[in-house]
């Protein structure tokens, strides 16, 4: 995590566990990660991955390692939601994905919070207090699911 001096944007660098997949995402108009909405979803794949997301505009997301020929980046397509989940074929970590589901119908990358460089248990504890829960299982992203503590 790095605050670009004299600008209102937060750079989220991060990657998989072994380091073969890396990304750099910029969140505009934010200087504190605690002010960026974070989401957890109860859909079948988010539950299996234990996914926890912060969204990044595709225009400001760079896959900096793993995408090259022979790189470790692999993708898994979750068809019902037209979502691509990216993972590392070496360590299996799942640092980000690409989705098209939101009110604006505009694609976005979703970065997995624990894969962000410099994220600490203290920051994650504070982020948890603001988590927005999505009922992906019920295909109702505008509302929280009935059961969410396990997410
Ligand atoms: Zn890896």
Image (spheres, rainbow, N blue to C red):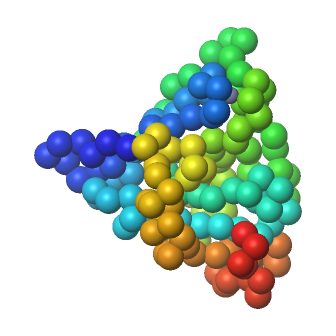
Q: Is residue 86 above or below residue 99?
A: above
Q: Is residue 36 above or below residue 23?
A: below
Q: Is residue 120 above or below residue 118?
A: below
Query: What x and y, as percent, mark residue 60?
Result: 43, 42
Query: What x and y, as percent, mark residue 109?
Result: 57, 48
Tell me the quadrant of the picture where the C terminus can be found: bottom right
Name of the residue lying farthest toward the top: 69
Q: Residue at x 57, y 75 (%)?
A: 132
Query: What x and y, as percent, mark residue 72?
Result: 71, 22
Q: Is residue 47 left or right of residue 95?
A: right
Which residue occupies the foreground of this view, 37 or 59?
A: 37
Q: Residue at x 46, y 40 (%)?
A: 117
Please give the count of numbered marks on the rendered protein: 0
Q: Is residue 76 left or right of residue 122?
A: right
Query: What x and y, as percent, mark residue 24?
Result: 46, 36
Name of the residue lying farthest toward the front: 121
Ligand 1: which quarter?
Answer: top right
| Quadrant in which residue 143 is drawn | bottom right
Tell me the quadrant of the picture where the N terminus can be found: top left
| Quadrant in which residue 145 is drawn | bottom right
Q: Is residue 117 left or right of residue 41?
A: left
Q: Is residue 150 visible?
A: yes
Which residue occupies the foreground of this view, 36 or 103?
A: 36
Q: Is residue 69 left or right of residue 79?
A: left
Q: Residue at x 37, y 67 (%)?
A: 35
Q: Is residue 12 above or below residue 134?
A: above
Q: Residue at x 72, y 12 (%)?
A: 70
Name of the residue lying farthest toward the bottom: 146
Q: Is residue 81 visible?
A: no
């Amino acid at each position: 995590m790095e605050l670009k001096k004299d600008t209102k944007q937060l750079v989220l660098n991060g990657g998989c566990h072994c380091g073969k997949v890396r990304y750099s995402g910029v969140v505009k108009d934010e200087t504190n990660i605690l002010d960026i909405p974070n989401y957890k979803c109860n859909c079948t794949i988010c539950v299996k991955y234990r996914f926890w997301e912060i969204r990044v505009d595709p225009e400001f997301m760079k896959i900096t390692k793993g995408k090259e020929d022979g790189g470790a980046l692999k993708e898994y397509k979750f068809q019902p939601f037209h979502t691509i989940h990216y993972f590392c074929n070496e360590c299996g970590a799942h640092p980000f994905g690409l989705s098209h589901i939101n009110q604006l119908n505009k694609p976005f990358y979703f970065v997995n919070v624990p894969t962000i460089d410099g994220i600490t248990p203290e920051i994650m504890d504070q982020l948890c207090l603001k988590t927005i829960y999505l009922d992906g299982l019920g295909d109702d992203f505008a509302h929280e699911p009935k059961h969410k503590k396990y997410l």
